[in-house]
């Protein structure tokens, strides 16, 4: 029998029992839709994470204080207080693969300005901080090297702070008080949004790091973090090694002694978040795959029922010259057509679900072509695998017994 005749026979068989065919395809539809939606969520989440980490800065290396312990009890990450202004100066002076360095000192507290108040974080930084974070100003200017060295009381506001203290007016030239110390606002940062940890990056105030150390935290010697930018992405690992060697020498650490600081690169952060997302996506993919298997069992069950119902028809066809292979191909094509139709409906359903989640829930959904092709290929394979046994059973029927079947 020619292929087009087999396809026409399969179409007529499926349309003859529309409700049963639709219910049989239900498992395939749900399975295919679930696989595509899960992959779209995973790919979208990965892209979202990469964009948010990129927004933290260009070729960024984050150097944090290490962990201190007392009496064998760890005091938590960042408790060693080992990083100093001298460390930042040494990195800037000696690390040939580093383009910009900024130590930071964080101070939280109530800020008063414009007749209003706002609880936020003031960060003492170097001018290079804007380069490290790939950050621009919407108005005003960043403080200068002279203002840094003179411990000037000047501040640059994040957009969240500016909107809360000076709504509907420019903050430039205004006065604010941080821990009762007066500062003059000289600039406002462009809006940056949330970072990969969900923190509002615009809810902060930048001031000279020397001013923060001398006027806000009691003239202490250690800094919270050091941000550094490698000259290019290929030099990131080598730049990290340079910084490690400089800091170990400055801190007088001998061979075998652990670092009292931590260095994180954007690549490490991206890999950490991506591996977590990939593990979750794989888990959900296996759940969706189980749904496809259940759908395949449904296809086999219905095809076995169909063989039983059409036993006499099979006997008539064999008696007029049809070969066993013709019967096998006919039922096999019916099973594949059933699962493939379910796969196509599943693809359409996944597009609808992805559109809803993106437009109504604000999620980033990316449906890739190869995922759709793979899902349809899996649905065809399920029809082939689970339809083979019923088709073989139909092809092996004895024509005399089949004609006697009531």
Image: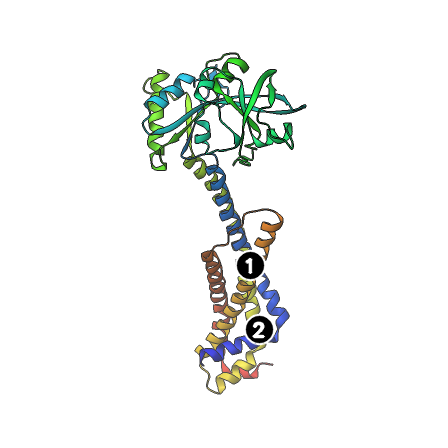
Q: Nearer the viewer, residue 61 or 206?
A: 206
Which quadrant of the structure image shows residue 247?
top left
Residue under the point 58% across and 71% down: 305
Rendering coords of residue 105 (x, y %): 50, 21
Location of mark 1 (residue): 294
Whether residue 43 is visible here, answered yes or no, is: yes
Q: Residues within 10 Å of mark 2 (few under 14, many from 20)?
A: some
Q: Earlier in the sequence, mark 2 or mark 1?
A: 2
> Is 315 left or right of 177, judged from the image as shown?
left
Q: Quadrant of the C terminus?
A: bottom right
Residue with the mark numbered 2 = 14
Q: Quadrant of the N terminus?
A: bottom left
Total residue callouts: 2
**296 versus 156 height, above or below:** below
**Where residue 9 sits in the image (x, y, percent)?**
53, 78
Q: Nearer the viewer, residue 178 or 67?
A: 178
Q: Is residue 18 above or below residue 68?
A: below
Q: In this figure, which colouring scheme has been used for the structure?
A: rainbow
Q: Residues within 10 Å of mark 1 (few under 14, many from 20)?
A: some
Compared to residue 280, the image places residue 108 above or below, namely above
Element type at mark 2:
helix
Which of the two marks, 2 or 1, is nearer to us in this view?
Answer: 2
Q: Nearer the viewer, residue 167 or 241?
A: 167
- Tell me what residue is drawn at x 38 percent, y 21 percent: 258
């Amino acid at each position: 029998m020619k292929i087009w005749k087999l396809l026409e026979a399969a179409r007529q068989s499926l349309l003859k029992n529309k409700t049963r065919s639709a219910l049989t395809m239900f498992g395939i539809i749900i399975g295919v839709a679930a696989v595509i939606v899960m992959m779209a969520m995973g790919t979208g989440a990965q892209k979202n994470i990469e964009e948010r980490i990129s927004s933290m800065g260009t070729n960024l290396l984050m150097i944090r204080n290490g962990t201190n312990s007392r009496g064998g009890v760890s005091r938590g990450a960042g408790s060693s207080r080992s990083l100093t202004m001298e460390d930042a100066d040494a990195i800037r002076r000696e690390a040939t693969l580093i383009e910009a360095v900024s130590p930071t000192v964080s101070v939280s507290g109530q800020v008063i300005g414009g007749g209003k108040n706002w609880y936020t974080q003031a960060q003492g930084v170097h001018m290079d901080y804007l380069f490290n974070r790939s950050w621009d100003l919407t108005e005003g200017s960043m403080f200068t090297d002279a203002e840094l060295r003179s411990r000037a009381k000047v501040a640059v506001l994040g957009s969240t702070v500016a909107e809360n203290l000076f709504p509907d007016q420019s903050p430039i030239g205004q006065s604010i008080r941080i821990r009762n110390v007066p500062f003059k606002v000289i600039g406002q940062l462009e809006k940056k949004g949330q970072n990969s940890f969900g923190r509002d990056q615009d809810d902060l105030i930048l001031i000279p790091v020397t001013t923060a150390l001398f006027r806000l935290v009691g003239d202490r010697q250690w800094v919270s973090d050091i941000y550094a930018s490698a000259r290019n992405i290929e030099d990131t690992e080598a730049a990290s090694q340079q910084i490690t060697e400089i800091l170990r020498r400055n801190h007088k650490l001998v061979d075998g002694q652990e670092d009292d600081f931590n260095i994180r690169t954007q690549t490490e952060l991206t890999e950490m978040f991506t591996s977590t997302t990939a593990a979750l996506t794989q888990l959900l993919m296996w759940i969706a795959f189980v749904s496809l298997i259940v759908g395949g069992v449904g296809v086999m069950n219905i095809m076995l029922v169909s063989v039983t119902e059409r036993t006499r028809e099979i006997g008539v066809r064999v008696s007029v010259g049809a070969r066993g292979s013709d019967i096998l191909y006919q039922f096999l094509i019916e099973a594949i057509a059933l699962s493939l139709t379910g796969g196509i409906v599943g693809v359409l359903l996944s597009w609808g679900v992805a559109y809803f989640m993106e437009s109504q829930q604000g999620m980033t959904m990316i449906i890739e072509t190869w995922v759709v092709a793979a899902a349809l290929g899996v649905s065809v394979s399920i029809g082939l695998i689970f339809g083979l046994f019923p088709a073989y059973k139909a092809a092996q029927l004895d024509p005399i017994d089949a004609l006697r079947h009531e």
